[in-house]
Image (cartoon, coloured by chain):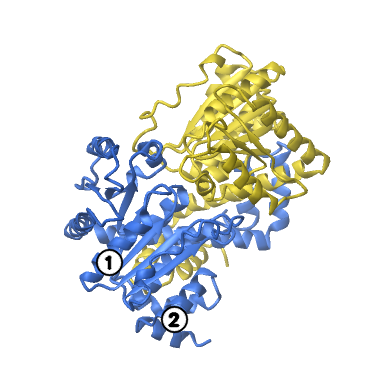
Chain colours: A blue, B yellow
Amino acid sequence: MDVRALARRVVEGDHVAAARAISLVEDRHPQAVQLLQELGPYTGRAYVVGLTGPPGAGKSTLADALTRLLRRRGQRVGVVAVDPTSPFTGGALLGDRIRLVDHSSDPHVFVRSLASRGSLGGLSEAAGDVVRVLDAMGCEVVLLETVGAGQVEVDVVRAADTVVVVAVPGLGDAVQALKAGMMEIADVFAVNKADHPDADRTVAELVNMLRLAPRDGWEPPVVRTVATTGEGVEELLAAVDRHRKHQEAEGLLGRRRRERARAEVLRAAEAQLRRALLQEASALVEELAAQVQSGRLTVGEAARLLLQRAGVLR
Amino acid sequence: MDVRALARRVVEGDHVAAARAISLVEDRHPQAVQLLQELGPYTGRAYVVGLTGPPGAGKSTLADALTRLLRRRGQRVGVVAVDPTSPFTGGALLGDRIRLVDHSSDPHVFVRSLASRGSLGGLSEAAGDVVRVLDAMGCEVVLLETVGAGQVEVDVVRAADTVVVVAVPGLGDAVQALKAGMMEIADVFAVNKADHPDADRTVAELVNMLRLAPRDGWEPPVVRTVATTGEGVEELLAAVDRHRKHQEAEGLLGRRRRERARAEVLRAAEAQLRRALLQEASALVEELAAQVQSGRLTVGEAARLLLQRAGVLR
């Protein structure tokens, strides 16, 4: 395949080429390296909005409603739905990927689902590069939607410039659902299904918690939405815009993107090291693991010896 | 502090010493290294049962009920509740750690909550070592309970010899809640709150999915429980016992523990490398991150250059 030609077509906004490019990146195809090199100069322009929250909060419907609004503004939109699906269930079980049909004929909306095949670890690595492809193809806004609320989702959504955490009233304890790492990554809260009788309580709980911890001069607003009717979605987008302007005015956006690049590089370095150790030092790994198992070595010592004997660290 | 004396008291089953030892391990105190070395020879005897599932599934109540049963058998029990709490909320919000009060006067039950302070990354590393302390203090069974269903929980619960996934009917879509990586790690399913009208449907869904994928000759049983009344808890423990015997008979337990040790060593090696890179090559990391940000380098190239220039890989 001619990777340069593919890259050129991506930059021209060709959907078929973009789909192909994303597949290469997702599969970590050897040619993905060159592809990303070619696309590099065309990236850095898209504004990435992360949408995360517990299952059933209505993130997909909200992403749909936001896409409609952004299209009305004339902006080109990319949507990446990251689904850390179990390799066991394969993700086909729920059919929740049948969606966004009403954008499928719009050449300025590009929607892609990313499922983890096998290891969850690679997903956050891939997500950043998939966003780069959409960025290079000219998407002005990329919505990065993640299912669930675990560490992988937190890592994925950190690739966003603004993180919208979608809470929902009455689904168990809304605040509990937000516990695991969600509170401190939110720039904007959407309390979706705000027509639910418990919505007031959920909003009040969130506002109370947020007052405790503004960051960088920004207190995350709490916006009520009903994604199915579109209610509150303009307010949500306005809150995202305000956050963007706040970050740009304070020089925070560049800093945030730098931090993200640093984390991505370190994660990729760890992954490369792991692959190298498993390939070139598998007997050593095996021997040290056996000594840990029998209690002769601690995990920490074994790790140190591994890095030392494999010549990685002195 | 005299670490050898502390280790001796842990091995004698002293609760105060064990609590102290766990704090050292959790905080990654410099003395934790020696402590774990001293305890090493006394480990490898505890059988570790993981309990995981979505928030609100009743894992704590189930752990309580299992502890009572195990005590009736005369076994010494350790309970580790891992709560990847947001550093923002601090975990105190829900007060859900006020529990297991009825075991507090029993010298043969040791309960400990592990919360992540700051980074979630270290939690799975710490959990393995905390289990080792309980193992060394003579706990014959360790219940490892995790809140949530993200990648951290999956990593933590992989430190178990038998993984019980707790599902619950009617809480959103029970199967959806199990999607993210839970299905393929379950050795036993407990459908808790089985007095709920939707329980039959949840059990049927699970049984259907499981038939598709027995592993190593083991088809995970689905047990109905009502943790609050103790109903089904004996059957659950019997299922865990069957799984243990199956693994022992087939030589699977040793293999599983070896795989676990290998994963722990690799994770610790990555963490050590990351610390070393951030300490010794922070300017290089910064420079490469800037080049990624500006599109001049891909993440993968930057990672390769980082490892190369820092002398880690050729």
* Disc nearest the viewer among 1 and 2: 1
Vertical side of A287 occupied by B114: above or below: above
Q: In which quarter of the image is residue A248?
A: bottom left
Res. B200 mark: none
Look at mark 1 in the image and give the residue it sits on.
A68
Vertical side of B59 occupied by A88: above or below: below
Check the image and name the residue furthest to the left.
A249
Q: Mark 2 lies on which chain?
A: A
x, y (%) of residue B197? Answer: 53, 35
Disc 2 crowd rating (10 Å Cα; few below 14, some 14-19, many 20+) is few
x, y (%) of residue B50? Answer: 61, 36
The Cα atoms of the two marked residues, 1 and 2, are separated by 22 Å
Q: Which of marks 1 and 2 is nearer the N terminus?
A: 2
Q: Which chain carries label 1?
A: A
SS class, disc 1? helix
Q: Quadrant of residue A30?
A: bottom right
Residue closest to the eye, A71 or B208: B208
Look at mark 2 in the image and give the residue it sits on.
A16
Q: Are marks 1 and 2 in contact (CB under 8 Å)?
A: no
SS class, disc 2? helix
Give the amino acid type for the residue marked by disc 2 in the picture.
Val
State how many labels appear. Answer: 2
Give the amino acid type for the residue marked by disc 1 in the picture.
Arg
Left or right, residue A191 beside residue B247: left
Residue B263 can be seen in this image:
no
Residue closest to the eye, B48 or B244: B244
Residue closest to the eye, A188 or A184: A188
